[in-house]
């Protein structure tokens, strides 16, 4: 559908659909497309270095010119073609399962007047939304959508940098966030509420940057030393003021422990009943930013580490989010030949590989290490089997899949290095946390998060991402942050539990420790 525009605007025509949108002279093309719901990949946050937001500028004559949308300013009427590979994946994406503790489920009232609510895990990469029957303490339906803020970078520091001191940019990110939550919540309510019952309450958990942006508070202070949030307390807000009034009346967020440790890890701690676990239990919420919470003998210890966007399928050459067509596992035989497995669409048959998601890159590199495709330093073998070695931008690659007329899918030497950086950040954070608590190793590890839920424990141990433990002492707990959000939605008493846990937690600031960087470097190699 075309839009009608006043005379002082310019027209951007998207071909071949011939959809037109209005722009003001001087508008950034990437931003104006996003304002109209057209999201392009922008792993670098719109700085013009990743080359993933390419559009073809169509002129009156000659071939179309491929140009990064983030570097394109609208000055006159223009026509563009958007290649499929430049578009952010569709709304609905894969989400992790949630597990609700028996003590919570047994407290259900069974009342007849079922009241609905919305629980949200607002992740940097994925937003998981749950429609909940609060009296029955039961999730009725759920879905997950890609966080459209990824348009402006895959990690929180990119988004903090994008916002800067620009109030209009903060408002833009807030609108993107609330719009995605509103769409998902509306879809769930329309599908699962035939009695015309509408949710009244909403609980949203997320890292401090995501919560600041959601509430319209600048996250700038998180991006500079001493990296503190603007507020620490739990908050209750009017949903209408956040653009969420169509699906709720109130929005509750949980406390924050530090600038990088927020209500999401506290919600996960509530869901996994961390306070009742034995000392030495380590909870890891693994994603673009890793949050760690350790139960010590005399209290709790927390830290965060920049594991990086590679674990979410970004910042790698053939990366994509976990969705149908994404390679989620890679086996390699004794002849060093790969066999990839993709995520199937629902219950349907497997589809041809389109790229590699986070669990796929971890699986693939673990297999490459086990089969000698890379050595313990991470370097690709000097010789690879015929037909499996390639080049991308002057960097050697190991070919995973090739299809006629399509760009090959491969893991490059640079991709291996990205995983090494994330792996070193995670295990170094664990090392420093254990040392501060006076422990040699954890007694149990709970791995939470959408990314963590799809990993194989053996791959984590092979790459040295976790301390060497028996596999039975490593437990995948699904989207524990989402589980905690559901619990808080049904019983506000859990907010007090989260507040008490936050008050008992000592924060370990890795960036302020002069020994951290040196230790980090020693952890880059694989075991």
Image: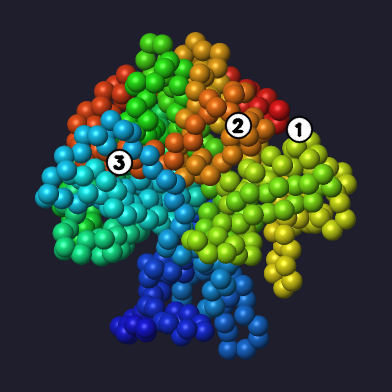
Q: Quadrant of the N terminus?
A: bottom left
Q: Residues within 10 Å of mark 2 (few under 14, many from 20)?
A: many
Q: Residue at x 46, y 76 (%)?
A: 75
Mark positioned earlier in the residue sequence (3 or 1): 1
**Residue 62 quadrant:** bottom right
Instruction: Quickly name the residue at label 2.
Output: 465
Residue 18's mark?
none
Position in image of residue 281 (x %, y %) = 45, 21
- Under circle 1, the secondary element is loop
Mark positioned earlier in the residue sequence (3 or 2): 2
Instruction: Quickly name the residue at label 1.
Output: 376
Q: Is residue 306 above or below residue 80?
A: above
Residue 485's mark?
3
Mark positioned earlier in the residue sequence (2 or 1): 1
Position in image of residue 469 (x %, y %) = 59, 23
Position in image of residue 178 (x %, y %) = 30, 56
């Amino acid at each position: 559908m075309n839009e009608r525009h006043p005379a002082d605007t310019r027209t951007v025509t998207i071909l071949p659909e011939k959809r037109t949108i209005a722009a003001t002279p001087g508008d950034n093309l990437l931003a104006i497309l996003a304002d109209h719901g057209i999201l392009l990949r922008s792993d670098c946050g719109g700085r013009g270095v990743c080359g993933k937001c390419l559009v073809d500028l169509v002129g009156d004559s000659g071939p179309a010119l491929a140009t990064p949308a983030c570097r394109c300013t609208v000055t006159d009427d223009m026509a563009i073609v958007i290649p499929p590979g430049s578009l952010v994946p569709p709304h609905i994406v894969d989400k992790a399962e949630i597990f609700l503790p028996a003590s919570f489920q047994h407290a259900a009232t069974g009342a007849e007047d079922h009241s609905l609510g919305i629980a949200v895990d607002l992740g940097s990469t994925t937003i998981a939304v749950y429609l909940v029957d609060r009296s029955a303490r039961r999730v009725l339906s759920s879905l997950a959508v890609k966080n459209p803020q990824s348009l402006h970078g895959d990690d929180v520091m990119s988004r903090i940098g994008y916002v800067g001191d620009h109030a209009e940019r903060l408002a833009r990110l807030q609108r993107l966030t609330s719009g995605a939550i509103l769409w998902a919540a509306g879809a769930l309510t329309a599908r699962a509420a035939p009695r015309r019952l509408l949710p009244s309450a909403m609980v949203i958990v997320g890292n401090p940057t995501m919560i600041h942006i959601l509430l319209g508070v600048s996250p700038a202070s998180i991006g500079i030393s001493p990296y503190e949030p603007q507020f620490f307390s739990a908050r209750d807000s009017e949903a209408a003021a956040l653009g969420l009034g169509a699906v709720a009346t109130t929005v509750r967020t949980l406390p924050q422990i530090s600038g990088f440790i927020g209500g999401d890890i506290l919600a996960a701690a509530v869901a996994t009943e961390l306070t009742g676990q034995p000392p030495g239990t380590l909870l890891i919420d693994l994603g673009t930013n890793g949050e760690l919470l350790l139960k010590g003998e005399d209290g709790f210890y927390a830290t965060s580490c920049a594991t990086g966007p590679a674990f979410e399928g970004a910042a790698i050459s053939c990366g994509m989010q976990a969705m149908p067509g994404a390679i989620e596992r890679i086996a390699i035989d004794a002849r060093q030949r790969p066999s990839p497995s993709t995520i199937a669409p629902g219950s349907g048959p497997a589809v041809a590989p389109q790229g590699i998601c986070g669990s796929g890159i971890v699986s693939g590199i673990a297999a490459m290490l086990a089969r000698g495709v890379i050595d313990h330093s991470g370097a690709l073998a000097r010789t690879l089997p015929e037909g499996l070695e390639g080049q991308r931008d002057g960097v050697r690659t190991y070919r995973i899949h090739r299809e006629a007329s399509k760009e090959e899918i491969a893991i490059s030497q640079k991709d291996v290095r990205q995983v090494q950086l994330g792996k070193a950040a995670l295990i170094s954070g664990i090392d420093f946390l254990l040392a501060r608590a006076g422990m040699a190793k954890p007694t149990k590890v709970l791995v939470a998060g959408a990314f963590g839920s799809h990993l194989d424990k053996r791959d984590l141990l092979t790459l040295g991402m976790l301390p060497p433990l028996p596999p039975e002492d490593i437990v995948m707990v699904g989207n524990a942050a989402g589980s905690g959000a559901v619990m808080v939605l049904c019983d506000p008493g859990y907010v007090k539990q989260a507040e008490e846990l936050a008050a008992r937690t000592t924060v370990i600031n890795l960036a302020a420790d002069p020994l951290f960087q040196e230790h980090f470097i020693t952890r880059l190699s694989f075991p």
